């Protein structure tokens, strides 16, 4: 760092003007990570057991905030106050941006996509992400279907958008009325998931409809449903979601079988991303 070479290890005395520190040192000569390290190591008296936690707090602060808290003789007693103020500001910021959604499903899905640890979104798309686009909730798209079990089906390799071939089996067929018409779809069970210890039984219902490539994703959408306990199954098309491939081409997504095409517009669930 040029500034340190010019002025020595500690270029700023206790009387050095704060504005000069902010404009000259932090903004022009010091990377954010270096400023954090300098503050935490040289000017704060932090017990070892609390040091890591405090550095994490510093990492959330802007350069301006770092400059304002950079005091060469800052008392150890002020550290909890600084931490509390930072956490309060973070909390206020979160309250200003609530999770959007008209239904619990929409809110949960938006929260999932907003969380960097779970979101399939690319970093550039997640940066300003506020929520997915949904068709307006419509109870007409919650249907009770007749369920027919198909126990003799042979497991098969489901085609995906990559070379991956997960094992599925056709679990049954569902027949239902939608907009005065009768439709039948196949439902599947993922055998790869079934082999996992924490597996919770569910059925996979992929489908295509006449909104694909227009208001909805061109590759179709998915619905996850509970295992039927009898000969009926409730299908909520308002909870139809896009494959991860609709957001990021690094994922491998099952291709909707052609027999699961609905010759009608399903104006429910998640819409196309970015349109």
Image (tube, rainbow, N blue to C red):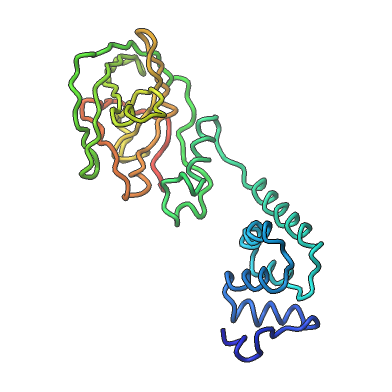
Residue 247 horizontal side relative to residue 167, left or right: right
Q: Residue furthest bottom?
A: 6
The quarter of the displayed image where residue 188 is located: top left
**Vertical arrangement, residue 205 with respect to residue 149, above or below:** below
Percent coordinates x, y for residue 203 in the rendering: 35, 23
The quarter of the displayed image where residue 162 is located: top left
Q: Nearer the viewer, residue 107 or 85?
A: 85
**Vertical arrangement, residue 214 with respect to residue 193, above or below:** below
**Number of marks in the image?**
0
Q: Nearer the viewer, residue 102 or 87?
A: 87
Q: Quadrant of the N terminus?
A: bottom right
The residue drawn where x is 27% and y is 12% is: 149
The residue drawn where x is 29% and y is 22% is: 187
Q: Nearer the viewer, residue 103 or 137?
A: 103
The residue drawn where x is 37% and y is 37% is: 242
**Vertical arrangement, residue 51 with respect to residue 115, above or below:** below
The residue drawn where x is 40% and y is 20% is: 226
Q: Residue furthest top?
A: 230
Residue 129 horizontal side relative to residue 223, left or right: right
Percent coordinates x, y for residue 94 in the rendering: 64, 48
Residue 147 horizontal side relative to residue 12, left or right: left
Percent coordinates x, y for residue 75 in the rendering: 81, 67
Percent coordinates x, y for residue 223 in the rendering: 37, 28
Residue 274 horizontal side relative to residue 68, left or right: left
The quarter of the displayed image where residue 145 is located: top left
Q: Nearer the viewer, residue 261 or 13?
A: 13
């Amino acid at each position: 760092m040029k500034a340190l070479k010019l002025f020595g290890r500690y270029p700023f005395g206790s009387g050095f003007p704060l504005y000069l520190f902010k404009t000259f040192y932090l903004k022009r000569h010091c990377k954010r990570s270096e400023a954090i390290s300098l503050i935490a190591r040289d000017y704060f008296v932090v017990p070892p057991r609390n040091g890591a936690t405090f550095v994490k707090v510093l990492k959330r602060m802007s350069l301006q905030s770092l400059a304002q808290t950079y005091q060469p003789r800052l008392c150890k007693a002020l550290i909890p106050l600084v931490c509390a103020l930072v956490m309060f500001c973070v909390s206020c910021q979160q309250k200003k941006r609530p999770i959007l959604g008209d239904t619990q499903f929409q809110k949960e899905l938006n929260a999932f996509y907003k969380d960097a640890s779970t979101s399939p979104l690319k970093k550039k798309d997640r940066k300003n992400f506020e929520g997915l686009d949904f068709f307006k909730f419509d109870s007409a798209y919650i249907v009770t279907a007749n369920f027919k079990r198909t126990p003799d089906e042979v497991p098969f390799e489901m085609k995906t958008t990559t070379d991956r071939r997960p094992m599925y089996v056709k679990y049954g067929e569902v027949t239902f009325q939608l907009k005065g018409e009768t439709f039948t779809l196949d439902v599947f069970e993922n055998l790869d998931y079934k082999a996992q210890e924490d597996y919770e039984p569910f059925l996979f219902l992929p489908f295509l409809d006449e909104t694909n490539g227009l208001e909805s994703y061109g590759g179709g959408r998915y619905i996850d449903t509970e295992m039927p306990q009898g000969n009926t199954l409730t299908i909520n098309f308002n909870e139809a979601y896009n494959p991860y491939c609709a957001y990021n081409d690094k994922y491998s997504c099952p291709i909707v079988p052609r027999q699961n095409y609905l010759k009608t517009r399903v104006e429910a669930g998640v819409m196309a991303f970015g349109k």
